[in-house]
């Protein structure tokens, strides 16, 4: 379990201009976890894609992100925002492919009034795992 000092909480406006802030914070947390330069860049790409997905399907509310250094060491990033209407928010095949290449695990939750994602990146570059919406990463 992550210690309180290994957790960063960030809230940014639901606007594409603020994704840069999320990427910078994610790269800082990954550096603290001991990621090499390539792994930091991969995580930045994953955070960018996941945050843009939230913005594109959200109602303009702020993005709420929690970043944790966990055993491994790995970095876990959870993000959420309020959903805009009930249109299909399923991530595109391209987004899924990018996240599969860029981080160890990823999951999108499109059920309900809040959209969520979870990313896990590992310093040991494990095989990527995709968890279908509504399924358990078990």
Image (cartoon, rainbow, N blue to C red):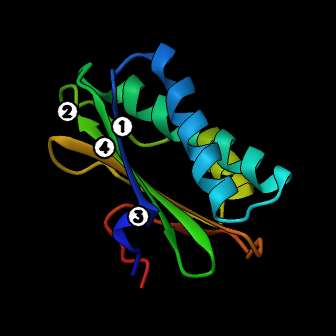
Q: Is residue 92 visible?
A: no
Comparing 88 with 10, the one in front is 10
Who's the residue at 77% across and 71% down the image?
125
Comparing 37 with 14, the one in front is 37
Observer-side mark, 2 or 4, equals: 4
Who's the residue at 66% across and 49% down the image?
43
Q: CA distance from mark 2 to mark 3?
A: 37 Å
Q: Are marks 4 and 1 in contact (CB under 8 Å)?
A: no
Coordinates of residue 33 in the picture (x, y in percent)? 64, 65
Q: Which residue is mark 1?
A: 89
**Secondary structure under the numbered disc 4 in the rendered image:** strand
Mark 2 Cα within 10 Å, few/some/many (few <14, many 20+)?
A: few
Lower position in the chain sequence, tag 4 or tag 1: 4
Observer-side mark, 2 or 3, equals: 3
Lower position in the chain sequence, tag 3 or tag 4: 3
**Secondary structure under the numbered disc 1 in the rendered image:** loop
Mark 1 Cα within 10 Å, few/some/many (few <14, many 20+)?
A: some
Lower position in the chain sequence, tag 1 or tag 3: 3
Who's the residue at 30% across and 43% down the image?
80
**Secondary structure under the numbered disc 3 in the rendered image:** helix
Mark 3 Cα within 10 Å, few/some/many (few <14, many 20+)?
A: few
Q: Which residue is mark 2?
A: 86
Q: CA distance from mark 4 to mark 1?
A: 13 Å
Q: Which residue is mark 3?
A: 5
Q: Which residue is mark 4?
A: 80
Coordinates of residue 45 in the picture (x, y in percent)? 68, 40
Comparing 50 with 9, the one in front is 9
Lower position in the chain sequence, tag 2 or tag 3: 3
Observer-side mark, 3 or 4, equals: 3
Would residue 48 appear left or right of 17 to someone viewing this image? Answer: right
Mark 4 Cα within 10 Å, few/some/many (few <14, many 20+)?
A: many
């Amino acid at each position: 379990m992550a210690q309180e000092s290994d957790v960063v909480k960030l809230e940014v406006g639901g606007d594409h201009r603020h994704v840069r802030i999320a990427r910078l914070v994610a790269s800082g947390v990954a550096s603290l976890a001991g990621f090499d330069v390539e792994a930091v860049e991969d995580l930045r790409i994953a955070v960018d894609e996941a945050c843009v997905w939230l913005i594109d399907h959200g109602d303009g509310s702020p993005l709420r992100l929690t970043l944790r250094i966990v055993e491994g060491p790995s970095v876990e990033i959870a993000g959420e925002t309020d959903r805009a209407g009930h249109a299909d928010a399923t991530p595109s095949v391209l987004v899924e492919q990018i996240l599969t290449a860029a981080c160890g695990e990823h999951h999108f939750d499109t059920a309900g009034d809040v959209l969520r994602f979870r990313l896990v990146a590992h310093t040991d570059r494990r095989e990527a795992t995709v968890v279908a919406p509504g399924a358990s990463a078990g």
